[in-house]
Image: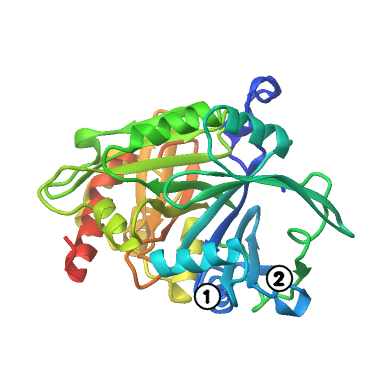
Amino acid sequence: MTQTTHSSSQSAPDTARQADPFPVKGMDAVVFAVGNAKQAAHYYSTAFGMKLVAYSGPENGSRETASYVLTNGSARFVFTSVIKASTEWGHFLADHVAAHGDGVVDLAIEVPDARAAYAYAVEHGARGVQEPYEVKDEHGTVVLAAIATYGKTRHTLVERSGYDGPYLPGFVTADPIVEPPAKRTFQAIDHCVGNVELGKMNEWVAFYNKVMGFTNMKEFVGDDIATEYSALMSKVVADGTLKVKFPINEPAVAKKKSQIDEYLEFYGGAGVQHIALATNDIVASVRAMRAAGVQFLSTPDSYYDTLGEWAGETRVPVETLRELKILVDRDEDGYLLQIFTKPVQDKPTVFFEMIERHGSMGFGKGNFKALFEAIEREQEKRGNL
């Protein structure tokens, strides 16, 4: 799988990968454990404009689980539900849904050599979940291994250079649930954000530094990332080519319950909070997704009254940004446009971000206050602030 990247990551020299102790090719898949994979696949097909490409279930030999694989550009989501748990993996998935609700169980990473990546990670302190093994079919061979990260989340290490099937051995090509839109709503996974318990952020940052050779990309603490009522701290780790980026959040002491506290309470511990999806036309994406029923956080009109004074000119007129409630941030490298969905399930846990980058490789630091206030308004409606 080839990961779509922005120009700044494409320009990284090949020598950086050669010297990287834990080279990666990009995100392979975001794997969700859900209560009803068939319905989840339908939702993401219709609401997010994704295309069903592969399936595994009782009809083709999987007696324990049903899995649907959806793609958009290089982004791949896998939705798995348990039909009847009979193995350790099946019981793990069933227990995960029972404990956490629908959520991300695996941030799978494509690597050039799964055996070497697993050996390096375990040697540097990772807890191995699955030692390297091969799976084969008529399309070739895939090597898989897995390590544990925060909460019950794992990273499956996927070596698929010798495979040309629709996803993995055991999956068959599937027809789309609905015809995908002519224009993609997004092209790639930009970053995946994890929420961890108070005092654990630096521990997990150190884990990625040591175990996977990731470097620290950004840091947000103190007034950068607080409102009158709630606060959090965040650090971003990334591989050397910036193809895989993992912001990690923890709550900070404040007057009221932060969004991270709310997530940890309702998810039942640490886990993936949101997935940012890269689009090259955020206006078209938001219009299409809104028309399909996706709900986005709202931003007060006052945000846009002075937007031009500090954000400068963007390719989207301010009035269109105001209409769609899209946020803007600018740094020394350029600017970005972003917007966040409301949680996509009943629990206030997993949500999504749409992001369009123009030079900036930031994460919307200038929007943190506006974003958190928008989330706080939703928390207040839920009675959780």
Position above or below: 254 against 98: above
Position above or below: 160 against 16: below
Secondary structure found at label 2: strand
Q: Identify the residue at image location x=43%, y=29%.
A: 206
> In the displayed structure, does residue 383 sit left or right of residue 271?
left
Q: Identify the residue at image location x=69%, y=75%.
A: 63
Position above or below: 245 against 74: above
102, 287: nearer the viewer: 102
Q: Position of residue 23 (x, y in %)?
A: 65, 31
Which numbered circle lies on residue 43?
Answer: 1
Secondary structure found at label 1: helix
> In the displayed structure, does residue 93 sit left or right of residue 371?
right
Tags 1 and 2 in contact by the CB under 8 Å rule? Answer: no
Residue bearing the label numbered 2: 56
188, 118: nearer the viewer: 118
Q: How far apart are the alpha carbons under marks 1 and 2?
A: 18 Å
Q: Position of residue 266 (x, y in %)?
A: 30, 63
Q: What is the three-letter code of the residue carrying label 2?
A: Ser
Q: Position of residue 159 (x, y in %)?
A: 73, 44
Q: Identify the residue at image location x=19%, y=70%.
A: 381
- For the image, the number of numbered tags is 2
Q: What is the three-letter code of the residue carrying label 1?
A: Tyr
Q: Position of residue 336 (x, y in %)?
A: 43, 43
Q: Identify the residue at image location x=39%, y=65%.
A: 99
Question: Can you see residue 262?
Answer: yes
Which numbered circle lies on residue 323?
Answer: none
Give the number of the mark in front: 1 or 2.
2
